[in-house]
Each structure stands twice: as C-alpha cells, then as structure tokens.
Image (tube, rainbow, N blue to C red):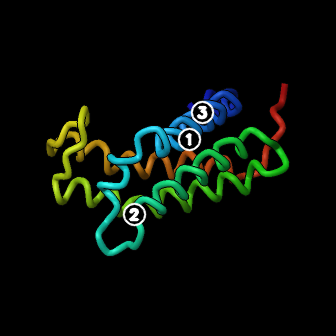
Amino acid sequence: MTIWFNNHKDTLRGILAVCMVVAGVLHFVQPDPFIRIVPGFLPAPATLVYLSGVIEILLGLGLLWPPVRQLSAWGLVVLFIAVYPANLNMAINHIPIAGVPDTWWFHAIRLPFQFVLIAWAYWFTRPEVPQLS
C-alpha cells in the first residue's frame, strides 16, 4: 500500500491542491455557511472566513510549486488544526447548512476526517525521496 501511495504522490498532491483552491474560492462565492460555523469566541467571523479562503488558495497553489511545497504543506497542517474548532462548533451546536446533513453519523465521519486531512498534508512536509526504478 505504501508503494502505491509513493508512486502516486504527485497525483495525490495535485488532488489536495485542487481541493484547497476550490474550498478557498468557496469562501468568497458562498461565505455565509463558513461565517455561520465560526465559533462565537472569535472576532470578525467574515474577516476570518475571507482570510482563511485566501490562505487556502495560496497554500493549495503552493503545493504545486516545488520551492514552497514543504512550507505550504506545513501551512495546511496548521490550517486544518486551526479550523477544527469551527467543525466542532457546527457539530456541537447543530448549525444547519443547506445541503449538509446535521446528523450524528455525518459528524462522526466529518470530524475524524479532519485528522486524515492533517495526515495527508503532513505527508507532503517530508522531503521528496527519489524512487528506485
């Protein structure tokens, strides 16, 4: 399994990059759902949403540019940790978002998936190892 992942690292990096750029753009196209899940103890929810959208776009693009690839991956690790309180807020306070289920099973999958994203980004923080042919 590890060999498969290593053989497809560039593809998987590209997938994560595209997902991050799309998610970042969504912060501008449809900011309301993101604003609604920002925990109440944080100031200026709209500003935080737009700022995180910019950061997601830049870090996603950074994954594709070799000189900043590892730094961008570290940035994503930090970002995924930083936005976890918003995901918890959505689950704990049952904040409804159109088209998103508000059920225990959805949150039971969604909340742990954040750790998959953290691990996925962390994988790209490691130096590239040349593959033996």
Q: Amino acid at mark 3?
A: Val
Q: Secondary structure at mark 3?
A: helix
Structural distance between the alpha carbons of marks 3 and 1: 5 Å
Q: Name the residue carrying label 2.
A: 45
Q: Which mark is residue 18?
A: 3
Mark 3 touching mark 1, by CB under 8 A? Answer: yes
Q: Is residue 76 above or below residue 133?
A: below
Percent position of residue 88, x then y: 28, 59
Which quarter of the rendering shows the C terminus?
A: top right
Q: Amino acid at mark 1?
A: Met
Q: Name the residue carrying label 1.
A: 20
Please identify the quarter of the rendering in which residue 64 is found: top right
Percent position of residue 92, x then y: 19, 59
Please identify the quarter of the rendering in which residue 4 is found: top right
Percent position of residue 95, x then y: 20, 52
Percent position of residue 116, x then y: 45, 46
Between 99 and 119, the one nearer to me in the picture:
99
Left or right placement of residue 126 versus residue 29 in this view = right
Q: Residues within 10 Å of mark 3 (few under 14, many from 20)?
A: some
Mark 2 touching mark 3, by CB under 8 A? Answer: no
Residue at 65% of width from left, 52% of height from top?
73
Residue at 46% of width from left, 38% of height from top?
29
Q: Secondary structure at mark 1?
A: helix
